[in-house]
Image (tube, coloured by chain):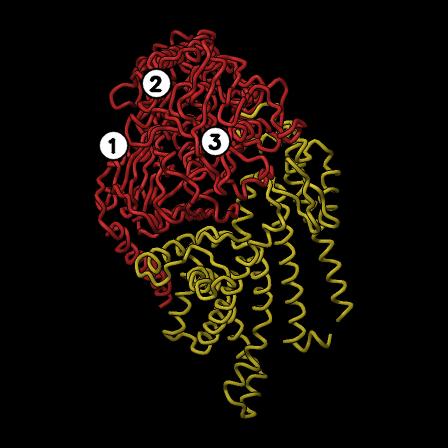
Amino acid sequence: MRRRTPLVAVGVALALALAACGGSGDSGGSSSGSGTFNAGLTTTVNQSTKTGGTLRIGNAGDWDNVDPADTYYGYSWDFIRLYGRALTMFKPGPGKEGLQLVPDLAQNLGEHSADFKTWTYKLKPGIKYEDGTPVRAQDVKYDVERTLDKSTFPNGPTYFNDFLDTKGYTSPYKDKTPGKLGLKAVETPDDTTIIFHLKKPFSGFDYFAMLPATIPVPQAKDTGANYKMHVVSTGPYKFESYTPGKSLNLVRNTNWDPATDPNRKQLPDRIQVQIGINADDLDNRLMAGSMDMDVAGTGVQAAAAARIQSNPNLKKNADSSPTARLNYISMSQSVPPFDNIHCRRAVQYATDKAAMQTAWGGPLSGGDVATHLLMPLIPGNQDINPYPSGPGNHGDLAKAKAELQQCGKPNGFSTVISARTERPKEIQAALAMQQGLQKVGIKTEIKKYPQGDYFKLYAGNPAYVKKNGLGLLSMSWGADWTEGFGFLSQIVDSRVIRDAGNTNLGVTDPAVDKLIDKATTTADDTARGAIWAQIDAKVMDGAWMVPFLDVKQLLYRPPNVKNAYVSQGLNGYYDYAQLGVK
Amino acid sequence: MVNFLIRRVLAAIALLIIVSMVTFAIFFLVPRLTGASSADLASRYVGKTAGPQAIHEVEVRLGLDRPLVIQYWNFVKGIVIGAHYNFGPSKVYCGPPCFGYSFVNQTPVWPDLLDRMPVTLSLAGGAAIIWLVFGVTTGVVSALKRGSPVDRASMGIALAGVSLPIFFTGLLSLAIFRDNLQWFPGAGTYVGLTQDPLTWASNLVLPWVTLAFLQAALYARLTRAGMLETMGEDYIRTARAKGLPERTVIVRHALRATLTPVLTIFGIDLGTLLGGAVLTEGTFSLPGLGKFAIDSINNNDLPRVLGVVMIGAFFIVLANLVVDVLYAVIDPRVRLS
């Protein structure tokens, strides 16, 4: 008799599970739509010009900041175009076209001096803020000044700090000049002209001009760290309300003039973002049709991925989107025997890349096995494979053993692999690597570190790495923008190596640094792309990094969402500035 | 009674001070003991490519370069008399109780806590009523019909409730009742009581029931065990012998004695939940104190962590105080002693 009680409980649970499994997802949402699997990679799915409705967006996390001076997240740079216009932007549209830069606030892409140290833009006439006041070049300069203030705005990128000839200028809030426009490195001779003076040449400055740092901010409305509560809009939508950590609601900006902006649409009446949603529930809502978009754009969770893969009705609404993100293992040359190139090459050959790919979700929701640093999204990419991993990419053990002989470790050696505690896939991949290396006698211990401190205190702290013998460092790096400099500059240039917060974990090659300098002074896009491919080959030749995964994100676009496509320029996210719901 | 209350309030204040000191120590003393400098701590709150100058500026702005004792003193001072904060173009006065500003996004902590409190209060309060009523009723019925199919079914369902993790039952309930049957289309989104009471309640039904399902088991079993013991007491036999109606015997005499331990557990449970029902809030995407606590801890956001820990401690202390007072109400023996 007493056995019945647990049986009742199990029965109830099973019944509930069966009821749920028979539920929402199988019908694939309310309307049929015209999508097929991966259609969003090459076409605009469900094209529409109808206005109205509310675009319902969910975010399982939260923004670093919605203020254009203080944001670094890729999805934020995509979404911010709904309420902010920078000097340039990526061309809207699926496919390779989306990698081109086009003018946004500016009339044309930048005019530069022969030495690439001076860049001039002229603003389009007639662009207004949400309150009808005109946008001036001085407002663009003011936001650039704000981004230099890393005390008030610590999160954003540091490109303007690193490249502008700031002459000690630190913040508009310490600026005593009239209008707080004391930064001499940026000139605004009139209301429509802005001139940037760099301290070192950079041929790709149009990419800097694409950053949210050039979204204009009216100085009279600037409340510093509080400005995020109502960012004054130049885009098709403006803030209705914002509660950090809870919700962000945008409504139509009636002072946005589509005649000045061929690159965006203003279709929904309202955009409603719910922040802090349970990630699995967000996926369920997308599949049930009660949510329209996951703004974070990093792909569905494992449970939803399994459902999508096995259900054709769901799979037709999914895109396995390639990104400019690489998962790799860095080798620390300060930790023996990784100071010997043959020991590094042994690891290159022995790594079981296929098992590591499986750990990350396989080809559909993990990514493709990587054989070098660049990926198809980066212009100039050349597919090379300097260390083939054998049939099935499980490792070429014979070649690995030959390299071990050459480095004087024929029976292998011991080292440590670092990984981040909060990233189970990273840990699983480290385990897969451990098992692969063991086959040639390389014994590894896996050490886990908190992700918040990983770069500041552990893997990114060269002294700690050397002291604690962290020979192999788990790494994942996404491009700031889809171009060679945007991807590689922070991970292969020896001059960016820092005492803490280091992101170049092992590459110190003066020849690579020289090639980077050459790339940054090459105007022609194709020629520049070719140099980045050379840099890729050179770093691979030094065997400093073991690339193993070109990351893909399994994205889901509910069938009721209109104009969805994956933007290559926006690093594999859907282009949020085109979406509709009618 | 007044002396009792004064003593308990003073003890509560002392406890809150100790809690704040321990929390401060955990987040700021322990890393230093393991070798982290204040610059290392500040580096958590900057972007991925920030250089040493930026880290230093943040270190100064957050006061991390000051001795720990000064940092703690400033924290206490803020609660009592308020503080000024530099937002860039101007300084802003943060009135008491000022729990400071988030290290991560520079929003004021106290208003954020006040904003999230109603969510947790709504969740915990509603669920508490359901689990108490259902738990105790189930326990009483099971005790009175001991060994019957009703008893077995009730205890079985109670066992399921306490065994199944809430992220499972929660997501399942959303999938069935929101997405499939569409009975509660807004579940997973919090709407304020004053904004729209009907939607507020409708959106909370699933989290209430899920959380109550988890908790009710304990109360059912506790009540059942207590009732079984009490119903065997001599005074119950005497009450029946005097000809009292069975309902009076059960409710006024047996249940009342059974409720003392139930009330103790209820006070602790409710007090703990008021500090944040972490798993339920996370599962149902409710922006309450529990979710706030988890996000703050993950972000090493000390001012927020301090704030939510103090609030949680306050509710636990308050709940225990209320329980102690209620003992005197329901149990005359406590009153007389």
Judge by depth and name the residue closer to the eye, A176 or A5. A176
In-image side of B22 versus A138 (left or right): right
Residue at the spot 44% in from the left edge and 34% down from the top edge: A126
| Label 3 or label 2, whichever comes before in sequence order | 3
- Relative to A316, is A12 above or below? below
- Residue A337 shows in this picture: no
- Residue A341 shows in this picture: yes
Residue at the spot 49% in from the left edge and 67% down from the top edge: B131
* Residue bearing the label numbered 3: A212
The answer to which quarter of the image holds residue A429 is: top left
Q: Colour of chain B?
A: yellow
Front: mark 3 or 1: 3
Q: Which mark is residue B328?
A: none
Is the Cβ of the residue at disc 3 closer than 8 Å to that at disc 2? no
* Residue bearing the label numbered 2: A372
Judge the density around disc 2: few (<14), some (14-19), many (≥20) Cα neighbours within 10 Å: many
Q: Secondary structure at mark 1?
A: helix
* Residue bearing the label numbered 1: A42
Residue at the spot 78% in from the left edge and 68% down from the top edge: B3
Q: Position of residue B87 (x, y in %)?
A: 64, 38
Q: Position of residue A453 (x, y in %)?
A: 55, 31
| Label 3 or label 1, whichever comes before in sequence order | 1
Residue at the spot 53% in from the left edge and 53% down from the top edge: B288
The answer to which quarter of the image holds residue A549 is: top left
Residue type highlighted by circle 2: His
Residue type highlighted by circle 1: Thr
